[in-house]
Image (cartoon, grey):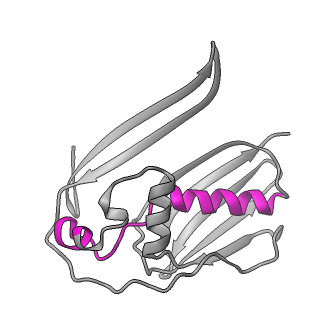
């Protein structure tokens, strides 16, 4: 437990390993932050559906794309990933009970877009590893830009909010 600007925070580490016999196939680690419920906030309207908008030709270095996550995208991603946490699809719950200004965009959704942009930029090379870290929340109807910059062995990725705040950062390394 830790005291933050928004109140009490609880940090939890979750680790999963997938094996076939003794061979490790994949390792996943998650650092999850839970916070106490703040006072309720005012509702924001949902945005119209808009998918990623590619800003540079695929393969450009650096590359970027823009996205405005909306309630439909968040609901579908929740269903796809079996994530039943209401902060991603239930606006009333999110505003009234959790006190957020809108629906919370999934960290793994932003990571999926970051990894996809890196993969496309690298000419669909086979990834060796991908790690990412959330740094600031993103809410629906909030425009974000995904950036990817590559060198010979890896691609650094970021999700930036409209004000330039880095919401999430990651790095993908490539098979030789």
- Location of the N terminus by quadrant is top left
Q: Residue furthest top?
A: 22
Q: Position of residue 20 (x, y in %)?
A: 64, 19
- Against 170, is 117 above or below? below
Q: Position of residue 85 (x, y in %)?
A: 33, 55
- Location of the C terminus by quadrant is top right
Q: Magenta region's main secondary structure? A: helix
Q: Is residue 162 left or right of residue 97?
A: right
Residue 134 in view here = no
Q: Position of residue 127 (x, y in %)?
A: 74, 45
Q: Residue furthest left?
A: 39
Name the residue at 49% across, 37% down.
29
Q: Position of residue 145 (x, y in %)?
A: 59, 75
Q: Is residue 93 left or right of residue 163?
A: left
Of residues 121 and 171, the one drawn nearer to the viewer in this rendering: 121
Of residues 19 and 119, the one drawn nearer to the viewer in this rendering: 19
Name the residue at 43% across, 65% down.
75
- Against 128, is 124 above or below? below
Q: Is residue 173 magenta?
A: no
Q: Is residue 96 magenta?
A: yes
Give the image quarter of residue 119.
bottom right
Span of residues in magenta: 93-122
Q: Is residue 93 left or right of residue 112?
A: left
Give the image quarter of residue 147.
bottom right
Name the residue at 45% across, 32% down.
15
């Amino acid at each position: 437990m830790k005291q933050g600007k928004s109140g009490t925070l609880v940090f939890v580490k979750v680790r999963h390993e997938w094996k076939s016999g003794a061979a490790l196939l994949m390792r996943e680690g998650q650092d999850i932050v839970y916070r106490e419920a703040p006072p309720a906030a005012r509702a924001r309207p949902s945005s119209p559906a808009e998918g990623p908008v590619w800003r540079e030709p695929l393969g450009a270095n650096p590359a970027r794309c823009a996205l405005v996550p909306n309630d439909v995208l968040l609901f579908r991603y929740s269903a796809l990933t079996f994530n039943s946490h209401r902060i991603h699809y239930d606006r009333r719950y999110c505003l009234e009970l959790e006190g957020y200004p809108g629906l919370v965009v999934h960290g793994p959704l932003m990571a999926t877009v970051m990894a996809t942009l890196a993969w496309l930029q690298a000419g669909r090379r086979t990834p060796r590893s991908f790690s990412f870290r959330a740094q600031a929340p993103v809410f629906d109807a909030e425009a974000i830009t995904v950036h990817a910059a590559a060198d010979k062995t890896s691609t650094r990725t970021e999700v930036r909010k409209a004000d330039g705040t880095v919401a999430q950062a990651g790095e993908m390394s490539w098979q030789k």
